[in-house]
Amino acid sequence: MSEEAIRNYLAGVEGRLAADGCAPRWEDWGGVPVLVGRRADFRLRWAATNLHLFTVAAAVPEVSLPVVEAFTTQVLTYARKNKGGLPVGMQTGVASFPVLVSDRVDPAAMAWAEEKQRNQFACFARPVVVDSARGHVGMYRGKPAVGRAYAAHLIEKGGRYFSPLG
């Protein structure tokens, strides 16, 4: 997939985020343009909590295990810092989709993204790795013990935002 096709994929994500009320915008993270979308949802079945969902997507030259791990940590830190409202854990949670798109993806990075949800206290990340050369979108689609109440919501949003390439 060409650089233009990667840009088109990110534009598609941006459009789906906008259609879902996430108010996407582009930010500069240390010289790298990143797409940031955000929404908040409240459900009584989530023990009356408000879940802030951040999606942060970027095109990178290569996705390796250290790159996806570092980006996931960076996105969780960003989401925690920018969610506003009550402190994390006080009837409020944070979830994120750290998304990296590249035509060069290490299989270990893809396996890491698909393996499990990454958790910090009241903060969850479901990394998404998009291998544009193979047309594969990898992310965890399960229901973990920690954060289980939000799993169906995150599975639905991930399916909505990150369409397969093709």
Image (cartoon, rainbow, N blue to C red):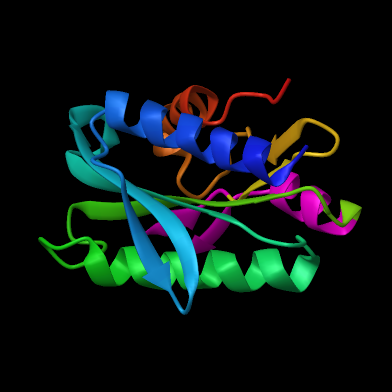
Q: Determine whether 104 is above or below 22 in the image.
A: below
> Residue farthest to the bottom?
30
Residue drawn at x 56%, y 64% is: 72
In the displayed structure image, the side of residue 48 where residue 104 appears, left or right: right
> Residue farthest to the right?
107
Q: Nearer the viewer, residue 105 or 107?
A: 105
Residue drawn at x 77%, y 62% is: 62
Residue 104 x, y percent position in the rendering: 83, 54
Q: Determine whether 3 is above or below 121 in the image.
A: above
Q: For residue 16, which quarter of the picture?
A: top left
Q: Is residue 123 magenta?
A: yes
Residue drawn at x 79%, y 48% is: 103
Q: Nearer the viewer, residue 106 or 51?
A: 106
Q: Determine whether 72 is above or below 161 in the image.
A: below
In the displayed structure image, the side of residue 47 where residue 139 appears, left or right: right
Q: Is residue 81 magenta?
A: no
- Quadrant where the N terminus sits is top right
The segment highlighted magenta reads: 108-126
- Quadrant where the C terminus sits is top right
Q: For residue 88, which quarter of the picture?
A: bottom left
Q: Nearer the viewer, residue 38 or 41?
A: 38
Residue 140 visible here: no
Residue 95 x, y percent position in the rendering: 40, 50
In the displayed structure image, the side of residue 125 where residue 102 appears, left or right: right
Residue drawn at x 10%, y 60% is: 85
Residue 71 visible here: yes
Residue 126 x, y percent position in the rendering: 56, 48
Residue 113 x, y percent position in the rendering: 70, 50
Q: Determine whether 47 is above or below 66 in the image.
A: above
